[in-house]
Amino acid sequence: MNSTYGIVAVALVSLATLGIGAFGLRLSRTTSDFYVASRSVSPVWNSSAIGGEYLSAASFLGVAGLVLANGADMLWYPIGWTTGYLMLLVFVAAPLRRSGAYTIPDFAQVRLQSVGVRRVASVLVVAVGWLYLMPQFQGAGLTLRTVTGAPTWVGTAVVAVIVVINVVSGGMRSITFVQAFQYWLKLTALLIPVFFLVHAWTNDGRPSPVAPEAWFQPFGEADGPGLYLTYSVMAATFLGTMGLPHVVVRFYTNPDGHAARRTTLIVLALLGTFYLLPTIYGVLGRVYASDLLASERTDTVVLELPARMIGGNTGELLAALLTAGAFAAFLSTSSGLTMSIAGVVGQGLNRRLASSPGMGWARSLSTITALRLGAVGGVLVPLVLALSAERIAVANSVTFAFALAASTFCPLLILGIWWRGLTARGAIAGLAGGGLCAGVAPIMTIVWGPDGWLGVLMSQPAAWSVPVGFGLMVGVSLLTRGDVPLNVARTMVRLHTPERLEVDRRG
């Protein structure tokens, strides 16, 4: 690809992102503006923003790469990521909005009246955010290197800097505008080249891609480990969505529970439309870019197809458009993740400093200033990891984050919303146990790489780590029934009663 076109595409997306974020800054004045956009985002606007932040590098680049490498069964990833919103619609969206919380730790404290649960949830929010942010930064570096030849660290640093600027300048209000714009940019960036690519393929006369039978089997096998991996991916993606902090925080921005449900329905349509497109790129890559398998560069297939299939200025321009869409994917998802981390870290920082002996000056630290400090600090660790760690496939690395969220926050939200018997000690046990299982497994896979069934179980832990999280929360709660909060009845009324009904919603 012509590096000039690539540089221009990245520059335009970056400038548009900063410009739209600056517009949001003009409207951000209060703490509520920065944390939840004053809970005034309409369903249509909010669904576009959710689509913008949710469709990450794993969706824009990773799905096509997985289909190219492993076949049709990799479609369980986009199916799971979309179905996760159906689960969120049915079980979580409206009650979570009615909780009045800003973050998942806020919800945990409101529901269980426990500072301890809040602290454990805060640590896990940061862990999930870092695990999800690292592949976004790595993918940005890979994309910029592919299209311009620049060192990998350049793209990583550019995304980190832009994201921090937007979050610290306008908070949730700014990134809502940015992410809504970036969803439609990503959809357009994939949609327009598809027409040219399919037309080139049909005129080329090449047959449909011929693949071995294993390409259509669950992870290459009809039973055994392959079947387990399929179900584990389904568990992680179906249940992990409702526990992703950057996804959950967007539902706090809706005016009420009804709007939250409407938002989720629109999101399902937006995601379903989008995920049709990476599949086409993956199948075409099987015909025109199968050599990427040997070089382990399958994540670049979306960016390379226009030059291979069309060439000339048209191919260069289409590749530049795809580059713009890919860079928008990194920026939008990274913004949402940074915002979720900043909200939790900022609240914790504000509470800790204000209550510490000899730190009287910290009482004047505003919640907005604390959020800004949290954004800067929250980005540093994944930035360093992205620059120093070995790169792994973006879709696979994101699945680790889904497994961690599914094993921790999914049980917390489901049981916290629908079972009044949940206790603080039960919640802590489930969060710690599920988080330990889902967190240690990928580390063992990367560092040790065990063989056989142990390696299979460690590479995709959700099928067993999610039951561990649920089991510990239920079991320990039953053993500590006396710890059920005294105000649990009022909390349940607040979560499950539509806002239009006049009831006592005090905690």
Image (spheres, rainbow, N blue to C red):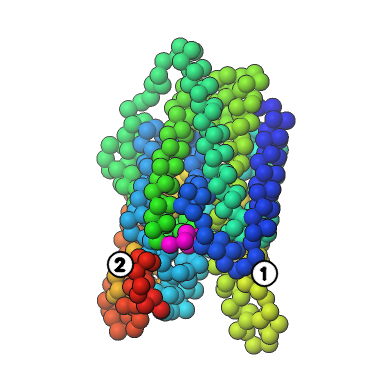
Give the quadrant of the C terminus. bottom left
Which residue shows up at 49% across the image and 54% down it?
A: 42
| In-image side of 381 versus 446 (left or right) | right
Mark 1 vs 2: CB contact within 8 A: no
Q: Is residue 405 magenta?
A: no
Which residue appears farthest toward the bottom when viewing the image? 357
For this rendering, which residue is in front, 386 or 174? 174
Instruction: Identify the residue position indicated by label 1 in the image.
Output: 369
Answer whether residue 100 is visible to the viewer in this image.
yes
Quarter assignment of residue 496: bottom left
> Could you say which is closer to the camera, residue 187 or residue 217?
187
Instruction: Give the magenta part as a residue range.
Output: 252-256
Q: Residue at x 61, y 60 (%)?
A: 171
Q: Amino acid at mark 1?
A: Thr
Residue 5, compared with residue 140, is above or below; it is above
Say which residue label 2 marks.
418
Q: Position of residue 117 (x, y in %)?
A: 44, 74
- Residue 209 on image: x %, y %: 41, 21
Q: Earlier in the sequence, mark 1 or mark 2?
A: 1
Q: Is residue 418 above or below residue 223?
A: below
- Residue 233 position within the rendered picture, expressed as x and y whole percent measured from the top left: 37, 47
In the rendered image, residue 155, in percent from the top left (x then y), is placed at 67, 44
Q: Main secondary structure of the magenta part?
A: loop
Mark 2 lies on a secondary structure that is helix
Is residue 254 found inside the magenta-colored segment of the image? yes
Q: Choose top left, top right, bottom left or bottom right for residue 193.
A: top right
Please give the name of the residue rendered at 40% of the width and 19% of the height, measured from the top-left corner: 208
